[in-house]
Image (cartoon, rainbow, N blue to C red):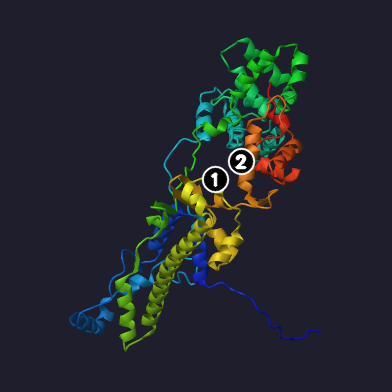
Amino acid sequence: MQRLGLVQKLSQRLSPQQIQFIKLLQIPTAELESRIEEELEANPALEEGPEELEQQTDNQAEDLEEKSETQEEEINFDDYLQDDYTGYKMQGDGQNPDEEDREMPIATASTLHDQLLDQLGFLKLDERQRKIGEQLIGSIEGDGYIRRDLESIINDLAFSMNIDTDIDEVEEILRKIQTFDPPGIAARNLQECLLLQLERKEDHSPEVALAKLIVEDHFKDFTKKHYEKIIKKLGISEDELKAAIKVITKLNPKPGGSSGELVKTQYLIPDFLITNNNGKLEISLNSRNAPELRISRSYSEMMDTYNKSKKKDKKLRETATFVKQKLDAAKWFIDAIKQRQQTMLKTMQAIVDYQYDFFLTGDESKLKPMILKDIAGRIGMDISTVSRVANSKSVQTEFGIYPLKYFFSEGIATDSGDDVSSREVKQQLKNLIDNEDKKKPYSDDKLEKLLKEKGYNIARRTVAKYREQLNIPVARLRKEL
C-alpha cells in the first residue's frame, strides 16, 4: 500500500552567478584571456572597452525618446531571434554546451605516428604486410613503447581487417619497425628499448660491448644497482663497469618523447606582481586579469525601447526575453570578473602579510608554516575559495616567480618548541642526501636520526614521504661505484 507524505529538506544550491565566479576564480591568467574571448563571441551584449558614461544631454534624451516610437519597426528582430545562442546562460555556465566536442585549431606538424608511417612506406611490403605494420604503429604509445601484447594485436587484425596472421609474421614486421628512427622505437619494455639503441651504435668499443652484455644478460642486477654481483659474474674491474654504465645512462629511455610529437607548451605568466617600494610591499594584479568590459549600448537601447513600447505582441515579447537574457549574462560575467579580481587581491594580501619576511628578503628559511585554513580565517572566506585562488596561480617577486602553492606547508615541531615549515625540513633532508657518501648512502632510518640531531622531530615515514616528494630514490638506488 502506497502512502503519501511530506518531507521537508534543506539544501544549498549555487546560483548561476556563483557558478560563473567559481569557474573564473580557479583558472590562471593564461587561460582567462581565451575565456573572455569565448564570452565575447558567444554574447553580443558584451563588448570590450571602458564603461560608457550614462550622462546624456537633454537633446540626446529627447532624440532617444523620439526614436523609441519608431525603433520597433526599424529593428529587424528576426535577425536576433535566429541567433544560435537563444536561451544562452540561463544555466549560469556561460559556455556552449557542445564546447567539449569542439576542437581548437592547431598548427600543422608531423607527429610521431606520421613519421613512422612515412618510414614504413620505404619498406618493400605487400598490402597485407603494410596493414600489419600500420596496426603495430598505431599501437605505439606517446613515449615510443608498444605495451599491448602481440596476441591482442593479432586479434585486432583478424576482427577489424580480416587478416589472419601469427606471432612469427607480426614479430618479423615489428623488427623492421624497430629499425626506424628514433632509435629504440616500438620496444615492448625498457630492456628491449636500450638494447635496440645499443645495437645501432656504430661505436664497437669494449665499453659498448660490455654495456650490451649487461643490459641483455644482467639487467635485473643493473636496475637494482647490485654492482658487486655484476663485477663478480663478469669478472671485470670497477672502472670497466663505470665506463659501461656511462654508456647505458646516455641512452634514451623514452624514444617517443623527442620525436616531434605535438606538445602544448605552457608559459608561466604571473598572476600577481609584488614590488618593494622602500621597504613597503605593494601588490598588483597582472593587467591581463583586469580586462575592460562593458554592456553593449545597442542592446541596452533595445531593452529600453521595449519597456517604452505600448504595443507588446508575442513576437516582441520573445525578442525582449532574448535581449534580457543576453544583458543579464553580460552583467553576470562582468560582475564575476570584478569579484575574481577582488578575491584574488584579498587572498594575495593575506599571504604576503603572513609571509612578509620572505617577500621582503627572499630568504626561504623565513617561510612560516602556513595552511589554507590560516589564510581563509584571515580573509573570512571558505578554505575551498583560497584553494581555488592558490591553484595554478603564481606571483612575480624580486627573487623570481613562485607558484602560490609554494608558500603553503605543514609545520614541524623542533626541540626548542617552535614550528618550522616542512619546506625547511625538506631542504635540510636534501642537503644531507647531497653530501652523503654515495658508496654508502643514508637509509631513511639514518636520515631520521640525523634530522633529530639537528632538532627536527620527524618520524621515519615522514622522512620517506618528503624524500619521495623531492623525487629522491631510496638508498639502494642512490648507490654509486
Q: Quadrant of residue 186?
A: top right
Mark carried by residue 364: 1
**Who's the residue at 31% across and 86% down the image?**
309
Q: Position of residue 197 (x, y in %)?
A: 60, 22
Residue 54 is at least partly visible in this image: yes
Residue type at numbered disc 2: Gln
Residue at the farthest bottom position: 310
Residue at the farthest left position: 59
**Who's the residue at 62% across and 25% down the image?**
173
Measure the alpha-carbon separation of dots 1 and 2: 9 Å
**Who's the residue at 38% across and 52% down the image?**
278
Question: Toward the viewer: 385 or 59?
Answer: 385
Q: Position of residue 303 (x, y in %)?
A: 34, 79
Mark carried by residue 312: none
Q: Are marks 1 and 2 in contact (CB under 8 Å)?
A: yes
Residue 95 is at least partly visible in this image: no
Query: In which quadrant of the rendered image does the C terminus lie?
Result: top right
Q: Is residue 88 above or below residue 73?
A: above
10 Å crowding of disc 1: few (<14), some (14-19), many (20+): some
Mark carried by residue 427: 2
Q: Is residue 23 above or below residue 73?
A: above
Q: Quadrant of residue 248?
A: top right
Q: Is residue 397 left or right of residue 10?
A: left
Question: Toward the viewer: 127 or 449?
Answer: 449
Residue type at numbered disc 1: Glu
Q: Is residue 473 left or right of residue 26?
A: right
